[in-house]
Image (cartoon, rainbow, N blue to C red):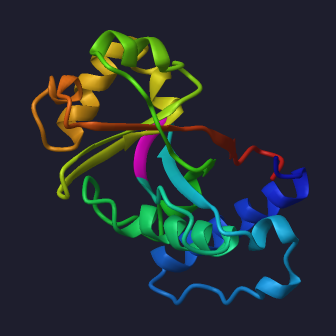
Amino acid sequence: MLSDSDRSTLLRIAREAVTAAANDQPLPSLDLDSLPAALRENRASFITLTIDHELRGCIGGLQAMMPLALDVQQHAAGAAMEDPRFPPVSRTEAPYLRIEISVLTAPEPVPHKSPEELIAALRPGIDGVILKSGWRHKATFLPQVWEKVPDPVLFLEMLSEKMGASPDAWRYPNTEVFRYQVEMFEETKDN
């Protein structure tokens, strides 16, 4: 668990990255040595941007490849500028974005021998899910997606389609399934 101070620092880093990216400026340099140990650990994160509760961008990583502070900074800029579903964030809309950060645990395989066992093993609202089929097809839904898609079958069908496969791809024995959890926090009027 991150401290309140760690969370505030990450939200500030994300906000500065989004603002810099939207204004076509380089990302601020981070002095990693001055940050708390928890923000220097290699962790994976997803950054979700919304305006008026509508998705405006979401980019992240599933594997811990760099210090968390740097991961958050890069994915915040990516969510603002590189989500292929949306045009880049403009400098005029950047101040109105709400930033949500999800820090991921390491993904783990979900052991199952049937679609029914898979559904029984998943914990709606708790588990983020990754589907992987071969080298080219891979997709994830964060645990927050359960709020909009609470039915496990529909959840997995939509995730199958997101990875570019048929809706029933999650049922195939060659589709790998992983789960992870997140520590999620977001900007409030106070921070």
Membership of 98 in magenta stretch? no
**In the image, 31: left or right of 63?**
right
| Residue 30 coordinates in the image, percent (x, y) | 71, 85
**In the image, 66: left or right of 107?**
right
Q: Nearer the viewer, residue 98 or 123?
A: 123
Residue in view at x 46 percent, y 74 percent: 22
Residue in view at x 57 percent, y 60 percent: 44
| Residue 159 coordinates in the image, percent (x, y) | 28, 33
Residue in view at x 42 percent, y 42 percent: 55
| Residue 18 coordinates in the image, percent (x, y) | 54, 69
**Furthest residue in direction front, as rendered:** 113
Residue in view at x 33 percent, y 22 percent: 155
**In the image, 73: left or right of 112?**
right
Membership of 54 in magenta stretch? yes
Residue 10's image quarter?
A: bottom right
Which secondary structure is most common in the magenta stretch?
A: strand
Q: Nearer the viewer, residue 169 or 6?
A: 169
Q: How many labels were placed on the picture?
A: 0
Q: In this view, does 44 lie above or below 122?
A: below
Residue range of the region highlighted in magenta in the rendering: 53-57
